[in-house]
Amino acid sequence: MKTKLLLSVLFMALLATSALAADTYEYTGKGTVTFNHKMHGEKMECSSCHTTQPPQKIAITGKKEGHALCLDCHKKEQKKGNKAAPKSCSQCHKK
């Protein structure tokens, strides 16, 4: 009984934390990738990533989806001379 109550409290705390930090998303796998939605939104159009109207949350469920969406764009930015675009795995994937 105490375990269920503790898990419920922890779950609610997690939901509250997620709601307060809605502009930052974390993806886990080979290290945690933290995505700052607000910062990206200030630098590019929503339609660059959100291809549906109205825009919907993008589900990144694995390496293939994440790299197709994120890494390809970062490579394009590097070619344009954007030095802020991550260049190595460890710049996005934090252990």
Image (cartoon, helix red, strand yellow):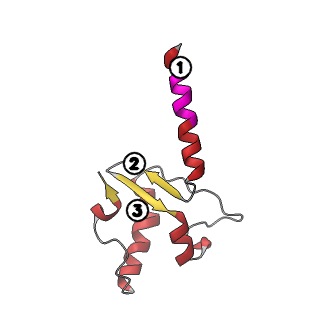
Choose mark 2 or mark 3, whichever is in front. 2
Picture quadrant of residue 22: bottom right
Instruction: Please tell me the numbered disc located at residue 28.
Output: 2
Q: Are marks 3 and 1 in contact (CB under 8 Å)?
A: no
The three-letter code of the residue at mark 1 reads: Lys
Badge 3: residue crowd in 10 Å (few <14, some 14–19, many ≥20): few
What's drawn in magenta, residue-wise? 5-12
> In the picture shown, does residue 65 fall above or below 84?
above
Is 78 one of the magenta-colored residues? no
User: Could you tell me residue 37's position as x and y percent?
Assistant: 53, 64
C-alpha distance separating marks 2 and 3: 13 Å
For marks 3 and 1, the one nearer the N-term is: 1
For marks 2 and 1, the one nearer the N-term is: 1
Q: Secondary structure at mark 1?
A: helix
- The residue lying toward the viewer, choosing from 6 and 64, is 6
> In the picture shown, does residue 6 fall above or below 17?
above
Asked if residue 64 lies left or right of residue 40, the reply is left
State the residue at coordinates (41%, 80%).
77
For marks 2 and 3, the one nearer the N-term is: 2
The three-letter code of the residue at mark 2 reads: Thr
